[in-house]
Amino acid sequence: MPDLHWKPAYELVAMIRRRELKAAELMAATIARLEKVNPKLNAFVALRAERAMDEARALDEKIARREEVGPLAGLPLGVKDLEDAAGLPTTFGSKPFKNHRPAADSVQVARLKAAGAIVLGKTNAPEFGYTGFTKNLLFGVTRNPWNLERTPGGSSGGSSAAIAGGMVPLATGSDGGGSVRIPACYTGCFGIKCCNGRIPSDPTLGMIPWNDTSVLGPLTRTVRDAALYLDATVGYHPTDPDSLPHPGVSYAAMLDRLPRKLRIAFHPDFGELVQRDVAREVARAVDVFKSLGHEVSVIDDRIPDVGRDWQRLGATQGYAMLHDMIEEHRGDFGRAYLSGLEAANHISWRHYGAAYRHRYELNEWCGRIFSRFDLLMTPTLPTEAFAAKGPPPSEIDGKPVRDVMGVVAFTFPFNLSGHPASSVRAGLTDGGLPAGLQIVAERYREDLVLQASFAYEQARPWQDKWPEI
């Protein structure tokens, strides 16, 4: 069956459940696609292809017996290499952990498997998810399907490259400062960062990742696919004491229930530089909501500067997690990650306390925004995808970026504040690369983020427009 690799997950699973498509047929086509495309992208770094085929055949036998199967039945799944999947290595993109093989699945992976998804392999990530582009000493560089000389972003860059390259219909991600939304933006797929605790997190080496700012979430080609993913993964689990009770609704069933007239705030720049053609495409995307009858207001409310606070919180957690290993394996860690960790030595309790005070100021800013508006929209990122090997751009349209946080200025604040946010494809830059629109809602309103994203997708569909590779 031609072009299975571009069909959205919701169509594939419906075909499998109606016995129009065998799970084994889909898995075989997926493996063939991966063998063709992965050498160009380096999205997958570990595979379990034979076992995945066996599981697909077993599922087909269940369906032939008319047994009940899950809502993700037969869907090939990529798992980010910062998350455990039994039988596969979890290396964190770090040489000291190249032989680390967990015995059990993470909560998220276990729930996806229980819903019928079949793990195909692990996707590449920068070392411990530290950078916004995907490169590490263990597996090398991951490349963007739209332009092989550009990055797919990070830290879920392997997952987004696998989605945008037509290798799998679903892939896991995690987002501590934009790591789902950044790669979704740079590869033109859909990603959503849920609020803290919506999908239970497992401790990383015994610690909660990124001082409670990192959350799990999907990379998909359509909004409905992401809603199905969330339906399978949300809800309390004792592994994560901060995880939330199940919301009691199906996100997929609610997608078309967006209120008729929303109050939308559009902040075009947060006071930072934005590439001209990115700004143009984002403004056009926001105009779609005007055409749908919503009230859009351009705002310029100054957001608190919390970039350094975000860096300090992440560095202290990372150093606390790995300090015993740093001296023994210093030469095996990447220089960028190691320097970031060692910066924690210069962070005092005063800095740490100030970071939490500034986080509270950010929460107050968000409170003022969402007391006046239902949604906040921004660019997802201020630039198109940069060079695959990095570094991030130091200037935009010939003007110097204020500091390193300027290239992720729109994403990390909502990790500190805990608000749900998605990235949808806004359009293509003059260079033919995707630009992203970020949609943010009040805490615990993933339903509204998904509904707004879905309404935009229906008005300006992108699911049939993918790079040739």
Image (cartoon, grey):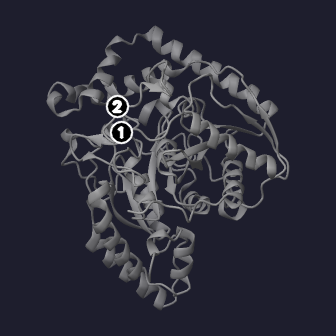
Image coords of residue 263 (percent x, y): 81, 40
Quadrant assignment, res 60 = bottom left
- Res 44 seen here: no
Amino acid type of the residue that numbered disc 2 sits on in the rendered structure:
Pro
Q: Is residue 6 left or right of residue 420?
A: left
- Res 209 seen here: yes
- Name which residue lies at 41% across and 38% down: 386
Q: Which residue is mark 1?
A: 387
Q: Quadrant of the C terminus?
A: bottom left
- Name which residue lies at 57% across and 58% down: 226
Image coords of residue 316 (percent x, y): 38, 22
Q: Quadrant of the N terminus?
A: bottom left
- Name which residue lies at 47% across and 36% down: 176
Closest to the observer, 274 or 362: 274
Q: Residues within 10 Å of mark 2 (few under 14, many from 20)?
A: few
Q: Which residue is mark 2?
A: 391
**Dot 1 lies on which element?**
loop
Amino acid type of the residue that numbered disc 1 sits on in the rendered structure:
Ala
Closest to the observer, 13 or 84: 13
Q: Residues within 10 Å of mark 1 (few under 14, many from 20)?
A: some
**Dot 2 lies on which element?**
loop
Image coords of residue 320 (percent x, y): 33, 25
Q: Are marks 1 and 2 in contact (CB under 8 Å)?
A: yes
Q: Is residue 373 left or right of residue 16?
A: right
Image coords of residue 418 (percent x, y): 60, 35
Quadrant assignment, res 104 = bottom left
Mark sitting on residue 265: none
Q: Is residue 347 left or right of residue 220?
A: left
Using the image, determine if residue 215 lies above or below residue 115.
Answer: above
Q: How far, Cα to Cα, is label 1 from label 2? A: 7 Å
Q: How many marks?
A: 2
